[in-house]
Amino acid sequence: MSKVRTATEVDVFVGAQLKFLRKSAGLSQTELANQVGVTFQQIQKYERGANRIGASRLWSLCQVFNVKPGRFFDGVEKHIAKANSKSSAD
């Protein structure tokens, strides 16, 4: 039996970083998808955090944007702490 996976806060954060980098570079989802060999729908899922970005795909994205992999995680600790404080306040 397969377990349905929901997006984690890290997936959502990394997806937001991807969207920021893509828009900063002036690329459409389709243009970026063509550069890394996926569909634009896959880029949409990455940006929403619905799909996790695998290591080899993350490396391809780093090559497109000329950034180090750590760039996608800059600030993730603060994001998680904020998300955790919101959920504990509910």
Image (cartoon, rainbow, N blue to C red):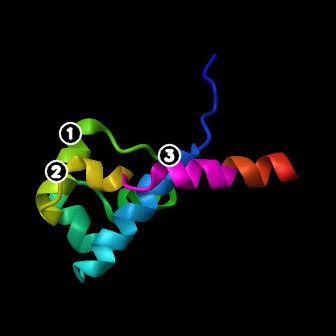
Q: Is residue 27 above or below residue 86?
A: below
Helix, strand or loop status at disc 1: helix
Q: Which corner quadrant of the image does residue 86 belong to?
A: bottom right
* Residue position for label 1: 56
Q: Residue at x 29, y 70 (%)?
A: 21
Residue 15 or residue 86, whichever sits in front: 86
Q: Are marks 3 and 2 in contact (CB under 8 Å)?
A: no
Tell me the kind of residue under disc 2: Ser
Tell me the kind of residue under disc 1: Ser
**Pair 1/3: label in front:** 3
Expressed as whole percent of the image width and height from the top left, the position of residue 42 reads: 38, 56
* Residue position for label 3: 10
* Residue position for label 2: 60
Helix, strand or loop status at disc 2: helix
State the count of labels.
3
Crowding at label 1, few (<14), some or many (≥20) Cα neighbours within 10 Å? few
